[in-house]
Image: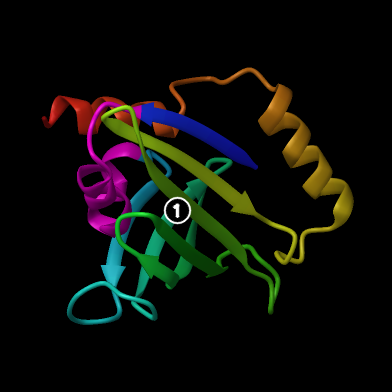
Amino acid sequence: LKDSVRINAPPERVWQYLEDPERMKLWNPKIKAVVSVSWGQRCKGFRYRLTYVLGGKESEISAEIEEYQPPTKLVIRHTGGRLPPGGYAQEIYELSRENGGTALTQTIQVHNSGINLFFRLLIAFIYRFGKPTGKKYLTVLKELVEGAA
């Protein structure tokens, strides 16, 4: 699952909203609560828990930063919740400078989630061809970052 947006702000400003789990709640309405498990600065290995609402049901998800390259790449591994034991999903953010702003790409990988192939294909189909019911999360992020300038 992949989405992209161009934001009229430098990558350093966009990064602040991606790498801080508390700020993620500002642009991702599915996140209802965040609890840090790790202390100190965010870096590879930093862990936190999310209360996430998907399909009208709350789920507790563990998150760990797998790759931390400010302000160009962030990879977060999600486990728990309704994923089967051993299953995980990755959320990947890649940022690059583009014409005085930032090109941001979000990729969500579910191929290791333990979700069977039929449902992974169904999710991908809906994500690509379905009609959005509200603003895309990256559009909300864009408006938030640009409004903070």
Residue located beneath label 1 in the image? 52
* Location of residue 87 with respect to 14 vertically, above or below: below
Residue at 27%, 25% (x, y): give it.
143
First to last magenta residue range: 7-27
Residue at 69%, 57% (x, y): give it.
110
Q: Chief secondary structure of the magenta span?
A: helix
Residue at 70%, 28% (x, y): give it.
128
As for residue 14 lying within the magenta part, the answer is yes
User: Callout 1: 10 Å neighbours few (<14), some, many (20+)?
Assistant: many
Measured as percent of width and height from the top left, residue 93 is found at: 46, 51
**Residue lying at the far left of the rendered structure:** 149
Q: Quadrant of residue 64?
A: bottom left
In screen coordinates, is 40 left or right of 53? left
Q: Quadrant of residue 109?
A: bottom right
In screen coordinates, is 9 left or right of 67? left
In screen coordinates, is 145 left or right of 117? left
* Location of residue 5 with respect to 42 vertically, above or below: above
**Is any atom of residue 141 visible in this view?**
no
